[in-house]
Amino acid sequence: MTYQGVLKKMMTSNNDVVQYYLDMEADFLNMNQLINKEITLSFVKYECLNCGLEKQIYRQGFCQSCFFETPRAGDWIMRPELSKAHLGVEDRDLEFEKEMQLKPHIVYLANSSNVKVGVTRKAQVPTRWIDQGAHEAIEILEAPNRYLAGITEVALKEHVADKTNWRKMLTNDNEDADLVAVKEQLSQYIPDEAKEYYLKANSEEIHINFPVEKYPEKVKSLNLIKTPTYSGVLKGIKAQYLIFEDNTVFNVRANEGLVVSIEV
């Protein structure tokens, strides 16, 4: 069977093993069911996730003009400390920014390739950890808005990483860490204005299991623009990556805005 649609990040459900779902417009695929099957991915065209036009994707699934105009790509998304909605200050669309920024946010530790600090809206827990390929995570504090979570992340990343080594994550080259101990150690560096939101009583690690039959020994990243058609046996899914038997990996989220066909 052949399915076609514009790529958006896979939806997930954190069961005993993470379940992955891909919305292909007319079809809704449970990607776990495709593991150990040969699939063919083909690039069809571009489709901007904002304007819907067939324009080359610039970043985050948006064409260049939309990337610099849509509030869904404001600087505060990648840098939460730049959030200003709590001050009533508009970046691109104040109503949208209030809706996104003035919600409870979690500052967390996640361990995928290494222990890192991050920020996400509370409603995105544990989705954010799954998307990063974290096999364990813990909440540090719950702030009432994105700004306070952002300045906390800035303070803590002076003492712990804020990036994931995606190659190590995909080869499963990681070690378990005592996140409770790391959390306690980092608590002294939380900014004064955010200290009251520290989750002292909430010190339970969350563990995540990914549906991977075989990890790659050395990853080869698939670029569907340069290689418009690829076939391989799917051996697993981790973070937002499809992992194939020949060590090829395909980052679904990094290819948002590409219309593809999937033949099974």
Image (tube, rainbow, N blue to C red):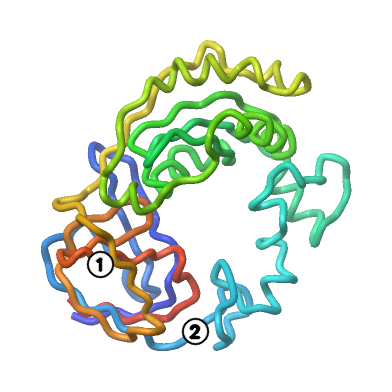
* Numbered-mark total: 2
Residue at position x 55%, y 79% from top?
57
Callout 2: SS: strand
Locate residue 51, reporting x and y percent.
Answer: 63, 79
Say whether disc 2 or disc 1 marks the residue closer to the N-terminus: 2
* Front one among 203 and 228: 228
* Front one among 12 and 147: 147
The quadrant of the image that shows the C terminus is bottom left
Q: Residues within 10 Å of mark 2 (few under 14, many from 20)?
A: many
Report which quarter residue 234 is drawn in: bottom left
Give amino acid for label 1: Thr
Residue 220 versus residue 154 in the image, above or below: below
Give amino acid for label 2: Tyr
Left or right placement of residue 264 versus residue 71 in this view: left
Left or right placement of residue 251 versus residue 109 in this view: left
Residue at the disc numbered 1:
248
Q: Residue furthest top?
A: 201
Residue 93 versus residue 197 in the image, above or below: below
Residue at position x 69%, y 38% from top?
150
Residue at the disc numbered 2:
46
Cα distance, mark 2 to mark 1? Answer: 22 Å
The quadrant of the image that shows the N terminus is bottom left
Locate residue 200, reporting x and y percent.
Answer: 56, 12
| Viewer-nearest of discs 2 and 1 | 1
Report which quarter residue 162 is drawn in: top right
Residue 70 versus residue 21 in the image, above or below: below
Residue at position x 57%, y 17% from top?
199
